[in-house]
Image (cartoon, grey):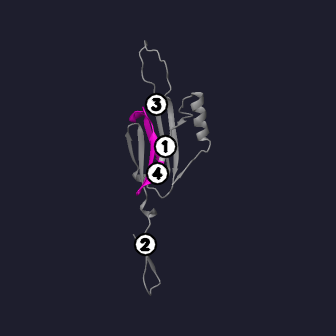
């Protein structure tokens, strides 16, 4: 149901982690995610700790979902001296190609405890159905 769009993206993420560089709008960092099927829904969960809902943007175009988010630095007073800063800042993005069997018109998004969860229903046309056979007429009917 899901296709990776860039095979080198994981390598870019590792290089960014090792070099300590942050994502920018022109070259965003990758956000980690999980994807799984739960009943009649496809669920995608993105880790976005420390990101406000106002800084998250979700776009859907045909069967492509794009999630962008920005984690900004916390405003600090002039007297504050940072001793350690390991949490990545900057822009994070993920683009996902969805199968045609998903209903992109009914995507639901929820953000809780730093996790953005998208729930995408399986389209009715993609669900299994029985085909009934009428005896003697030679025609078949599809029942839903």
Residue found farthest to the top:
79
Instruction: Give the magenta range.
Output: 35-62
Pointer 3 residue: 71
Q: Secondary structure at mark 2?
A: strand
Q: Which residue is mark 4?
A: 36
Q: Earlier in the sequence, mark 3 or mark 1?
A: 1
What secondary structure is found at the residue carrying circle 4?
Answer: strand
Measured in 3D between alpha carbons, the distance from the residue under mark 4 to the one under mark 1, in whole angstroms, is 10 Å
**In screen coordinates, is 112 left or right of 85?**
left
Q: Residues under labels 3 and 1: Cα distance?
A: 17 Å
Residue named by callout 1: 33
- Measured in 3D between alpha carbons, the distance from the residue under mark 2 to the one under mark 3, in whole angstroms, is 49 Å
Residue displayed at 42% across by 41% down: 116
- Along the polypeptide, which appears first: circle 2 or circle 3? 3
Separation (CA) of disc 1 from disc 2: 35 Å
- At 49% across and 21% down in the image, what residue appears? 84
Q: Which residue is mark 2?
A: 130
Q: Is residue 76 above or below residue 99?
A: above
């Amino acid at each position: 149901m899901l296709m990776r769009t860039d095979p080198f993206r994981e390598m870019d993420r590792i290089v960014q982690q090792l070099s300590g560089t942050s994502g920018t709008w022109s070259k965003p960092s990758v956000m980690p995610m999980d994807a799984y099927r739960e009943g009649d829904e496809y669920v995608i969960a993105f880790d976005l700790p420390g990101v406000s809902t106002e800084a998250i943007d979700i776009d859907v175009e045909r069967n492509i979902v794009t999630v962008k988010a920005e984690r900004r630095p916390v405003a600090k007073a002039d007297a504050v001296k940072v001793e350690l800063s390991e949490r990545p800042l900057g822009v994070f993005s993920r683009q996902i190609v969805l199968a045609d069997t998903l209903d992109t018109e009914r995507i639901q998004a929820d953000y809780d405890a730093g996790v953005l969860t998208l729930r995408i229903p399986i389209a009715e046309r993609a669900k299994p159905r029985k085909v009934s056979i009428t005896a003697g007429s030679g025609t078949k009917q599809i029942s839903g």
